[in-house]
Image: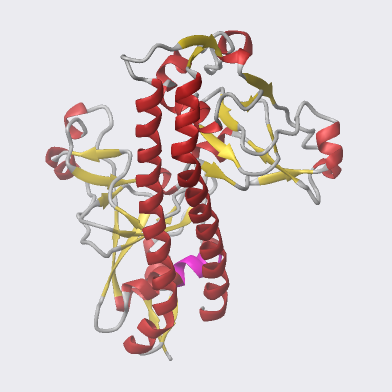
């Protein structure tokens, strides 16, 4: 093992932001431009684009840099510690310090996993009153012990294999959801079929949630029920969910507006970002920013509810009200209607049942992969 400063084994680049008031810097832009927000809740190793791209004019107007494929992106503020690898040429805003590794001494994948494991160690080096930021100078002088290049590749070999399997599963999940959505359209959006148009509330029980007092630790310590907020839903990158960021205790459930929602319901955001939905695979609770849609009987499959929400997000958002933030109300939401046809429901269920089960198995497998990766990181770095 030999000790180096990061500046000796990688070229370090900062980013920048074109003037946001100039639409010519952004409209129809084709240069991928990444901000730390793009990595919030991002569960993938490689990133190819962000929420916004910039134009050539926008690129030339500021001090951002065009980074090559394979560059390691490390968020240096708000927050410190998001890590990803550039999947293609891209640039970033000023919230990143990016590393182009010197290939004769540092394997980029090794640095990626090193930063993932040691981001908290780097976070404490940040300074600032408004928000913490780790400077380019601090990172340039940060010392890292490196084995030989061959040993670096050997150390991360298993981690790379796990991440490749994870990404393969994600690609399959994306395609399977598209297939199930196609089947939904075929059976419930077919202009040649005769449907009964029924109010949503006739088939679905709509439950709102609540928040236990955050001042009472007994409502949160040793929590046993997953407690979902809109953020848990919007950051979920597939249609099934098994866990939320926080849990509440039995006393938290009993002393708040939170209610126990059965497995295989649809939980949907009802404020802020409206109409995002996932299917919960276990009993959960939610806060007041979520509607839980529970099938009343076996007539309407949970997948039909999920895709109805997904494909009617614009309609759902259109009934929102509020001055501080938009929110939909139960009394308005329950009046929305669903296409129902008994034969369509039976055939849709039959066609999607095994697809759904396989989809669920891949989601669970990815959770195991993520847990195994965390354990491997702890042993290798």
* 1 left or right of 203 in image: left
The type of colouring in the image is secondary structure
Q: Which image quadrant is residue 184 in?
A: top left
The residues colored magenta run 114-121
The N terminus lies in which quarter of the figure? bottom left
Residue 370, image x and y in percent?
52, 62
Q: Is residue 273 visible?
A: no
| Rendered residue at 45%/31% (across/down) | 348
In the rendered image, residue 45, in percent from the top left (x then y), is placed at 38, 60
Relative placement, left or right, of 123 versus 249 is: left
Horizontal and vertical percent position of residue 15: 29, 51
Q: Residue furthest front?
A: 343
Image coordinates of residue 33 in percent, x first then y, are 27, 45
Task: Determine whether 228 is above or below 224 in the image.
Answer: above
Magenta stretch, main secondary structure, is: helix
Looking at the image, is 368 positioned above or below residue 200? below
């Amino acid at each position: 093992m030999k000790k180096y400063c990061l500046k000796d084994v990688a070229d370090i680049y900062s980013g920048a932001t074109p003037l946001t008031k100039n639409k010519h810097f952004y409209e129809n832009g084709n240069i991928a431009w990444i901000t730390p927000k793009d990595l919030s809740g991002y569960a993938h190793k490689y990133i190819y684009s962000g929420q916004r791209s910039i134009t050539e004019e926008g690129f030339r107007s500021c001090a951002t840099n065009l980074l090559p494929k394979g560059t390691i992106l490390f968020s240096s503020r708000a927050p410190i510690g998001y890590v990803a690898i550039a999947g293609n040429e891209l640039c970033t805003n000023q919230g990143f310090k990016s590393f182009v590794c010197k290939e004769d001494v540092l394997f980029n994948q090794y640095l990626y996993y090193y930063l993932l494991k040691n981001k908290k160690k780097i976070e404490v080096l940040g300074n600032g009153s408004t928000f913490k930021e780790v400077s380019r100078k601090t990172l340039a002088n940060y010392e890292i012990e490196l084995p030989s290049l061959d040993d670096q590749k050997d150390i991360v070999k298993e981690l790379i294999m796990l991440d490749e399997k994870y990404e393969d599963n994600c690609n399959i999940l994306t395609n399977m959801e598209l297939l199930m959505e196609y089947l939904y359209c075929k059976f419930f959006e077919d202009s040649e079929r005769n449907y009964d148009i029924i109010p949503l509330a006739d088939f679905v029980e709509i439950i709102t949630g609540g928040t236990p007092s955050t001042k009472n630790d007994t409502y949160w310590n040793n929590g046993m029920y997953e407690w979902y907020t809109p953020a848990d839903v919007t950051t979920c990158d597939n249609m099934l969910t098994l866990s939320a960021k926080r849990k509440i205790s039995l006393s938290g459930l009993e002393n708040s507006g939170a209610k126990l929602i059965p497995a295989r319901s649809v939980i949907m955001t009802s404020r802020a970002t409206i109409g995002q939905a996932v299917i919960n695979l276990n009993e959960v609770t939610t806060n007041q920013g979520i509607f839980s849609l529970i099938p009343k009987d076996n007539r309407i499959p949970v997948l039909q509810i999920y895709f109805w929400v997904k494909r009617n997000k614009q309609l759902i958002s259109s009934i929102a009200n509020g001055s501080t933030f938009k929110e939909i109300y139960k009394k308005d939401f329950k009046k929305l209607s669903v296409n129902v046809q008994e034969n369509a429901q039976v055939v849709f269920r039959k066609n999607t049942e095994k697809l759904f089960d396989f989809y669920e198995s891949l989601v669970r497998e990815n959770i195991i992969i993520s847990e195994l990766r965390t354990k491997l990181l702890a042993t290798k770095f």
